[in-house]
Image (cartoon, rainbow, N blue to C red):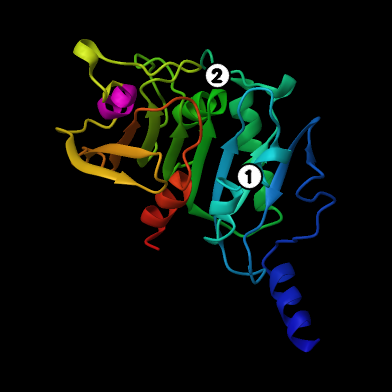
Amino acid sequence: MRLILILLSLIFASGFSVAQTCSEQVPCQLDGRSYHVKAPDGWDGVTPLPVMLHFHGWARQGTLIVKHSRISGATRKRGVLLLAPNGLGKSWDYWSPNSDDTTFADAVIEDAAKHYPIDRSKIFISGYSYGSAMAWRFACETKHSVAALLSVSGTLRQSETCTSIPKEVRHVHGTTDTVMDFPFGPNGDTTYPVKLWRDAKECGVGVRSGRWSVAPKDTFVRTNWEECEDGGTVRIDVHARGHFIPVGWFARQLDEILGL
């Protein structure tokens, strides 16, 4: 009992309160909109948390994300706080700059920071499908410093001009995707889907690091750009299948980024 009281006093002294009127399946209300939150397993209530804000796919909501084995299953086992905002009409406005959804997602991070001690040096932005394109839009114009963009099967136009650039970019896409078509470059270039970030970060020549896999059905060819002028990196994992979140992909990225 005494230990619990000490922990609670430390939390309140730090200006944080984990007491919210929302839970995994009951959304947190925020200025007429909402988001879901999932704390990692075994969190002590005090240690600052890396954050992964994930944009759901079309016709989905955050209720799915916080129980998704390939998303929440990755964050909760790696000490990462998962934030899952809900899109209006179960979709996102990523088509043009100055999206209201970017403003909303910025506010989600700030609202969550009132209840959890967020490690602002480890803000990760992710998304799948339409949500991946929204993750790109957010990373392109957010006021927050994005440590890593983790995107699955969805991009913006590679000609976009961004006011914000993530420190690290990791993208995965299937060459036979017919939902968010794989954006092949000239002469079938399979590195074209990350051209926007390679140009913005002034990266050098990409180097293939060979094939890797987590599940038997999914084999990825990774290309890395390590020598970018801003000190960051860009990585793309290409597979030959369609539109889905690969088993173990988010887990693998977080393991690498967090050095686990």
Question: Could you tell me which residue is drawn at 39 percent across and 28 percent down?
Answer: 173
The quarter of the picture where the N terminus appears is bottom right
The rendered magenta stretch, by its main secondary structure, is classed as helix
Name the residue beneath numbered marker 1: 68
- Say whether residue 165 is visible: no
Percent of width and height locating residue 254: 44, 52
The quarter of the picture where the C terminus appears is bottom left
- Say whether residue 7 is visible: yes
For the image, the number of numbered tags is: 2
Percent of width and height locating residue 170: 37, 38
Question: Could you tell me which residue is drawn at 44 percent across and 22 percent down?
Answer: 155
- SS at mark 1 in the image: loop
Image marks 1 and 2: residues in contact by CB distance under 8 Å: no
**Label 1 crowd bin: few (<14), some (14–19), many (20+), radius 10 Å:** few
* In this view, 155 is above or below 107: above
Question: Could you tell me which residue is drawn at 74 percent across and 68 percent down?
Answer: 12
Viewer-nearest residue: 114 or 249: 249
Percent of width and height locating residue 207: 16, 38
Residues in magenta, as a range: 193-200
- SS at mark 2 in the image: loop
> In the rendered structure, which disc, 1 or 2, sits on the residue that comes first in sequence?
1
Name the residue beneath numbered marker 2: 94
Query: Magenta segment: does it hold 198?
Result: yes
Using residue 192 as the reference point, say whether residue 103 is left or right of it: right
Quadrant assignment, res 90: top right
Quadrant assignment, res 91: top right
Give the residue furthest to the front. 216
What amino acid type is highlighted by mark number 1? His
